[in-house]
Amino acid sequence: MIALAAQSRPQQVRAAIARFEMLDRLMRRLEHADAFTSVSDRLRVLRGRLIKGRRIPLSASAGSVGGDQFGILAYACNICGTANKRRMALLQREEPSCDGCGSTLRNRGVIHALSTSLFDDNLMISEFPHRADIVGWGMTDWDGYASRLAQRLSYTNTYYHKEPFLDITSVSDSNMATLDFLISSDVLEHVGPPVIRALENSRKLLKPDGALILTVPYGLQAETIEHYPNLHDFAIVGEGEGRRVVNITADGTQEIHSSPVFHGGEGSTLEMRVFSETGLLADLKTAGFSRVTICAEPCFEHGIYWWYPWSLPIVARP
Ligand SMILES: [Zn+2]
């Protein structure tokens, strides 16, 4: 019996990495020579195809969190295209892990979810088609991808405190069913209760086949923990450790809450709730989303690997 010579798994992986690195070196040299832009563009597509669908990491098999057995992951950032290498255990939701644009696992996870939702394909933003007919909004999106999305799609980043405004708890009728996608990344944990109102408005903004690209921090506890369920007319008083949330409820009762939690700064980033996966999925269902996917699958070629089961990107369609 003749056995065909086949490359072992480690050989295949090493060969794939070598091809990727060779192309990447070539691309970087060409990108410095203006005359070769078209060649560079073609190589970029070639590089994308080469790594698409392949598992580039040296050892992506499961291991203890933080252990060496996670290996090194080589990947191209799906936001800026930069080739990166990182120890897989260092890929953190909120830690910059791209040498080019500083994108985090969450940032790349959002773009991955958007790409697969719109194009059923795993594209870098630079590979997105120019489609003015695809309309989307962001909710205070990270500028690292917002500016790039605006070059490809009819995309508008909106803000709570400046133009163009969007208060997701109060949406104009004229905007209903106008969006192909809405990105809401780590916003809804800061929106006043009840959060179902923000989710319902998100659903109403979408066209029937539109997609909400949603991230929030969530845990695996039984229920969402709502810090201020009776929030109505409130102010944050005091300084530092002594800060309090003083709330007058709808029926005029005063509540004082100690130890408020703020995310990433002062003031408007007050944490309103800690979602649970179960609670969030139930809220999405109540808000009228019938097709909900938790994006747990890794996308190694773009440096997306969720080695824990919480706070993952979610795609929700009406
Ligand atoms: Zn990047």
Image (cartoon, rainbow, N blue to C red):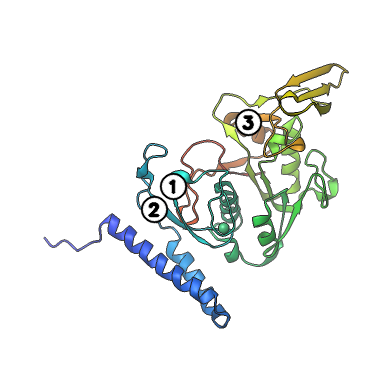
The part of the image, by quadrant, that contains residue 256 is top right
Of discs 2 and 1, which sits in the foreground?
1
Between residue 234 and residue 49, name the one nearer to us: 234
Name the residue: 46% across, 41% down. 307
Of discs 3 and 2, which sits in the foreground?
2
- The image position of residue 132, as x and y in percent, is 71, 65
Whole-angstrom CA distance, mark 3 to mark 2, is 32 Å
Q: Residues within 10 Å of mark 2 (few under 14, many from 20)?
A: many
Residue 125 in sight: yes
Q: Residue furthest top?
A: 253
Q: Which residue is tagged 3?
A: 275
- The image position of residue 274, as x and y in percent, is 64, 29
Name the residue: 44% across, 62% down. 51
Q: Which mark is residue 88?
A: 1
Q: Which residue is tagged 2?
A: 57
Mark 3 vs 2, N-terminal side: 2
Where is the C terminus found, in terms of image quarters? top right
Q: Does ligand 1 reach within 8 Å of label 3's beta carbon?
A: no
Residue 287 in sight: no
Whether pointer 2 and pointer 1 mark residues with C-beta atoms closer than 8 Å, the reply is: yes
Between residue 285 and residue 55, name the one nearer to us: 55
Residue 36, placed above or below residue 73 = below
Between residue 282 and residue 229, name the one nearer to us: 229
